[in-house]
Amino acid sequence: MTISAQKKSVATAAILLAVSLTGSACGYYKTDTKPKVNAVNPAGNFVGSYYEKSSITDKQNKYWIPLKPAAASIGYRMKDDTSSGGYAKIGYTDVMYMLKPDSVQVFSLGEKITLPDAPVRRDGQIYITPTALSKLLQTEVGWNPSSGEINIAPPRDKDTDGSKTLRIQSASNVDTGELVDYARKFLGVPYDFGAGPYEETKKFDCSSFTRHVFKKFGVSLPRLARDQDNIGRRVSRDNLQTGDLIFFTVPGRFESDAVPGHVGIYIGGGKFIHTWGEPGVQISELDTGYWHDVILHMQRVL
């Protein structure tokens, strides 16, 4: 490929990436809007490349980039609650990474890990070094300080080899009809990425909703969808019952699409209840439309 052709390919990929992220990376979705997937280049390959104009090189010649556009380049939302003592949270419909400025201790895919450099706050933004970002996301991050080009590979997940152990939980005395009725009471409750406890925020994200509903009936679920996926046992569509959890993949977010990025509750009649964008908690069709195409598996926890 000639240098001219290479430049044209990079430019095309950058345009595709910009189009896919405009108005979607950190905002709300309307009910007729499908979740966005990562941009692809003309060859059909994943694109996690963008040009950062607000990078900083410190006195030690260390290179820093704003965290929010880096997260957006691979299709993640970021919610920064650090100014009020909380965490900066990164993920898709669910929080996957959490950190605070000036601390090397972060949470990455359910694990507490230590970064080589602590993120810092500058001019109202959180900055991070590419090496620290690489460890946070558990993936490769490339950068060119001269051009400002940043390349982020699809993050990996340690559970994609199928070696996870399912923890069987017995809760057979739960009335699934009552569980569904209780879940329906929250229809229209706003979606908020990384939502705090419902009692405080009156909002949910996908996994805090399922956790809140099941807690009412004495079933303790972990906070994140990828961890809720470790509870119970797999069931097929033919054996799906009211009250089963349904997990959905997030195409292109990981090296493998076998990582759950969204979760809902089956309510019978080919429908499930979940929260996503606007209007928040809603009921969707399982066997048709977007969600049918991204079903990962079904799980029974009752």
Image: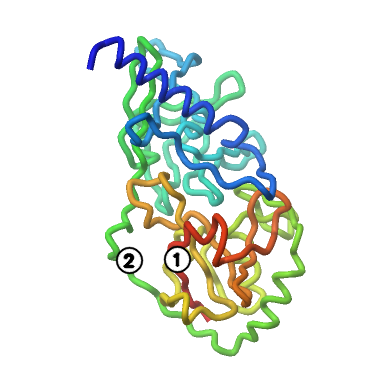
Amino acid type of the residue that numbered disc 2 sits on in the rendered structure = Lys
In the displayed structure image, the side of residue 64 where residue 188 appears, left or right: right
Q: Give the residue displayed 47% in from the left and 73% down from the top.
A: 299
Crowding at label 2, few (<14), some or many (≥20) Cα neighbours within 10 Å? few
Residue 205, picture quadrant: bottom right
Return the residue nearer the eye: 211 or 265: 265
Whole-angstrom CA distance, mark 1 to mark 2, is 10 Å
Disc 2 target residue? 164
Q: Secondary structure at mark 1?
A: loop
Q: Is residue 298 above or below residue 87?
A: below
Residue at the spot 48% in from the left edge and 34% down from the top edge: 71
Is disc 1 surrounded by few (<14), some (14 to 19) or many (20+) residues within 10 Å? Answer: many
* Residue at (37, 11) in percent of width and height: 147
- Residue 121 location, x and y as percent? 54, 25
| Rendered image coloring scheme | rainbow
- For residue 252, the mark is none
The extreme left residue here reads 1
The amino acid on which the numbered mark 1 sits, given as a three-letter code, is Asp
Q: Quick one: quadrant of the N terminus? A: top left
Provide residue 172's location: percent of width, then percent of height. Answer: 55, 88
**What residue is shown with label 1?**
229
Q: Give 240 or 184, whichever is nearer the viewer.
A: 240
Residue 236 position (above or below residue 7): below
Q: Position of residue 22 (x, y in %)?
A: 58, 30
Residue 264 picture quarter: bottom right
- Badge 2 marks a residue whose secondary structure is loop
160 vs 241, nearest the viewer? 241
Whether pointer 1 and pointer 2 mark residues with C-beta atoms closer than 8 Å, the reply is yes
Mark 1 vs mark 2: which is more N-terminal?
A: 2
Residue 222 spot, x, y in % from top left: 51, 64
